[in-house]
Image (cartoon, helix red, strand yellow):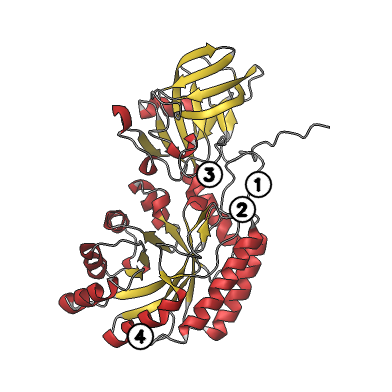
Amino acid sequence: MQAKTPIHAPIDQFPVSDGKLVIGGMPITTLAARVGQTPFYAYDRQALRARVAHLRAALPPAIKLHYAMKANPMPALVGLMAGLVDGIDVASAGELKVALDAGADPAEISFAGPGKRDPELWQAVASGVLVNVESMRELPVLAAAQQALGLPARVAVRVNPDFELKGSGMKMGGGPKQFGLDTELVPEALAWIGREGLAFEGFHLFAGSQNLRAESICEAQQKSYELALRLAASASSPVKFLNLGGGFGIPYFPGEQRLDLAPIGANLAAIVERAAKELPQAGIVIELGRYFVGEAGLYVARVVDRKVSRGQVYLVTDGGLHHALAASGNFGQVVRKNYPVTVANRVGAAEREVASVVGPLCTPLDLLADRMDLPVAQVGDLVAVFQSGAYGPSASPQGFLGHPAVVEVLV
């Protein structure tokens, strides 16, 4: 008996009206006319609000939610998220400016990254944000900034743990890594921080990202908490901040299912209960990027040509890997797999075919859908790539081959 071909998880965050996807209350054709050009990215405000509310309902109230804006740094979106979550995590001075301009509270901004330049560290101190220290080199720079500016250098130690997040798409901890300080070096860093009088606040542990296995996330959270508790004994002051990372994934590919939050919520409730006794001053943070924004976004391109080559249908669009590198399979995939894709103005059409969606670039890597079952499309139709709210324009080579930059809208 032949095995069934796996299918994508249901895409139910966008309604359909008269065969057209609806985002931000508008049919996709109306939105395309409002934007005035294709390709474009569209992010749904209501979907973003609903995702934050869903997460808050599933996790203990004591857990703080931080948005890792590297997933999507669009200023309007960051402004919306700053009002929905408890804090923003930035990874550069450029992102810090966006977060501050968006009205995020500096007291709830943390700054991570393995290669912070000296001016960036001074900017962080001057802005009053928390620096996740990832190298012993950063410490004297922060001390100098603290002395010169007369402001506290708020620091948390980012720890490279001796374990990984099993099943994660990207491993951010365990073994040799450019991120954070190896566990065995942390006591030395804590001693330096205490001796020089930096404002120690806690620890940041991030074992990996894009994980759909709740049991793996729970295990990493438990190990991260135990490690932080052990390291806290070497700190000169109580832990106020404990970032247990994130790692929550979304389903991109056939056969994947949405993450079950129930066991994660129960696991975090147990950690919160322990922390109330063992680290009573610590606020526990979960840092998420794509989980907040990934499913709230669409990438939309227009079909500019329809070709048949030796029996295979190609829908050639005005968008491609220069705007949507991740969807093309060139952003970390080892074996290319299709994101969920549809013809956005013909959803549910009875007439279907197997077609590939490609872009205008002169490279075979410019592939948005490889031989997918799609509604039959004609020139002028709109192709939508789902799960496109994270790692889109800012993670794509928009200057490649000189095509126009993509537009982003928050609706």
- Mark 1 vs 3, N-terminal side: 1
Q: How would you rate the neighbour count of disc 3 (Cα within 10 Å): few for under 14, some for 14-19, many for 20 or more?
A: many
Q: CA distance from mark 1 to mark 3?
A: 13 Å
Screen quadrant of the C terminus = top left
Q: Horizontally, is 57 left or right of 392 in the view?
A: right
Q: Which residue is mark 2?
A: 212
Measured as percent of width and height from the top left, residue 297 is found at: 48, 40
Q: Which residue is mark 3?
A: 295
* Residue 214 higher or lower than 60, as above or below: above
Q: How would you rate the neighbour count of disc 4 (Cα within 10 Å): few for under 14, some for 14-19, many for 20 or more?
A: some
Image quadrant in which you'd find residue 8: top right
Residue in the picture at 56% in, 52% down: 249
Q: Amino acid at mark 2?
A: Leu
Q: How would you rate the neighbour count of disc 2 (Cα within 10 Å): few for under 14, some for 14-19, many for 20 or more?
A: many
Q: Amino acid at mark 1?
A: Gln
* Residue 312 higher or lower than 369, as above or below: above
Measured as percent of width and height from the top left, residue 336 is found at: 54, 36
Q: CA distance from mark 4 to mark 1?
A: 45 Å
Circle 3 SS class: helix
Which disc number belongs to residue 257? 1
Image quadrant in which you'd find residue 338: top right
- Mark 4 vs 1, N-terminal side: 4
Q: Which residue is mark 4?
A: 191
Q: Are marks 1 and 3 in contact (CB under 8 Å)?
A: no
Select label 4 or label 1 by which is in front. Answer: 4
Q: CA distance from mark 2 to mark 3?
A: 14 Å
Q: Residue furthest right?
A: 1
Q: CA distance from mark 4 to mark 2?
A: 38 Å
Circle 4 SS class: helix
- Mark 1 vs 2, N-terminal side: 2
Q: CA distance from mark 3 to mark 4?
A: 43 Å
